[in-house]
Amino acid sequence: MKTDKSTSALFTLGLVIFAVGVRAQDTNAPAAPAPTPLTTMLPSTTISGYVDTSAIWVPGTGDAHPAPVAFNTPQKQDGFNLDSVDVRLSKAADDTTKWTAGYVLELQYGPDAINPFGGTPIRQAYVDLVAPVGNGLHLQMGQFDNILGYESNDDYKNPNFTRSYGYSLEPVSHTGLLLSYQFCEEFSAEAGVADSITSQGNANSFIAGANTGVAESKKSFISLLTLTAPKAWGSLAGSTLSAGYDQGTGTSMPGADREELYVGTTINTPLKGLTFGASWDAVWNDDMNIFGFPLGAVTPATEVNTGYNTSYAGYMVYGVTDKLSLSARGEYFHGSAAIVSPLGLGYNADIMAYTGTLQYNLWANVITRLEVRWDHVCNSVNNGDLFGGTGAPTEKNQVLFAANVIYKF
């Protein structure tokens, strides 16, 4: 049982339940009933989470058009922010030799909260089942985080505070069934069926013509393969290469298709603490026309595959000491800005972005980071501006300074 501060409340509750049973026996009252399923599960439940805060400054006046990446909204510029509060309850199903079960219930609040159901704080909620087949087959059913991508939904797990264009292209979660299997230490695979490869769930998976009242839907395919360098590879041991492919319903029209392809790698080096990474994300939206707008009321058979976005990123992380680390990221994004931008810019663009992060963890359980980011428009329709301004964009360059403080429990 995990008995640190994060589970002290559950431990206390267990003692109270036990004490009530003892008093009943001491007063010659009838024997206490057998523990309920809830109380017997409490000792194996773990509570964890974090509080994520930031301060952001963008030099200059007017910032109605920040860099079009996830969680980078005008409301967060030039101020202090409570980004998100995350609370996770979980019970691991980690015995692969038996029929075991676990669960995850994760709630998230705040402007950066991932709430696929809209209006609710539920980020993840799924049942984790283990079938004793070979090395143990995991089956997750419910709502779970997206399996593709270099960066995590949890900010503190990423090298940088701000998100990449690749992360911004991907869905944040799925609703469905996911199978995971570890063939050996060097190879694992994940594959599943979901309502949609977007984060909208079954409400977005109905086929064209669903407004006739016929509840027919199409499902989506998600997958990820991961290779891990063995110990015999010396300093490269633990390095990974992952590739994934998703295909299913898109966002602009019921029944429309969307495809996602991801390749990513993390490479350890002979220099202790130095790690390199790289990723490629590509998204094809079959329900978009050449201008990046929805095709409208057409059948999937008449769609054209022209809504295309791609992002390339390179990463470097150097752990100078146990507390101090330096991280850098360089990116190139090409495609329809109407897809990636929450502001719906409505035309194609090429953007370069460079991010540098200094992290120093002075306090226990606390991550503190300082970051600078520069986004530059290489090309856009009519060579137009994409950033800044109080109305229309007025800048091709945008520099952002951020401080990020996260407490983990």
Image (cartoon, rainbow, N blue to C red):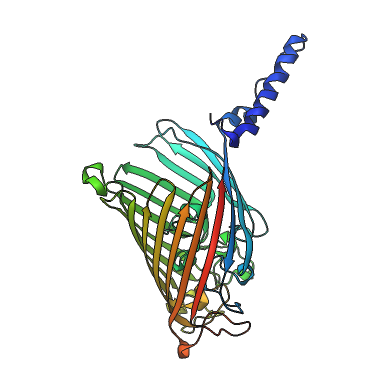
Q: 155 or 54: which is nearer to us?
A: 54
- Do we see residue 213 in this rendering? yes
Q: Is residue 179 left or right of residue 27?
A: left
So how many labels did they put on this image?
Answer: 0
Vertical placement of residue 88 versus 99, above or below: below
Instruction: Locate residue 195, reporting x and y percent.
Output: 52, 58
Q: Is residue 350 left or right of residue 67?
A: left
Instruction: Locate residue 373, reporting x and y percent.
Output: 47, 69
Instruction: Locate residue 255, reporting x and y percent.
Output: 52, 69
Q: Residue at image x 28%, y 51%?
A: 271
Q: 237 or 96: which is nearer to us?
A: 237
Residue 352 figure quarter = bottom left
Instruction: Locate residue 60, reporting x and y percent.
Output: 58, 78
Residue 259 figure quarter = bottom left
Q: Dividing the image into 4 quarters, which one contains the C terminus?
A: top right
Q: Residue at image x 44%, y 55%?
A: 147
Q: 298 or 311: which is nearer to us?
A: 311
- Do we see residue 288 in this rendering? no
Q: 399 or 35: which is nearer to us?
A: 399
Vertical placement of residue 234 versus 297, above or below: above
Vertical placement of residue 99 versus 356, above or below: above
Vertical placement of residue 160 versus 18, above or below: below
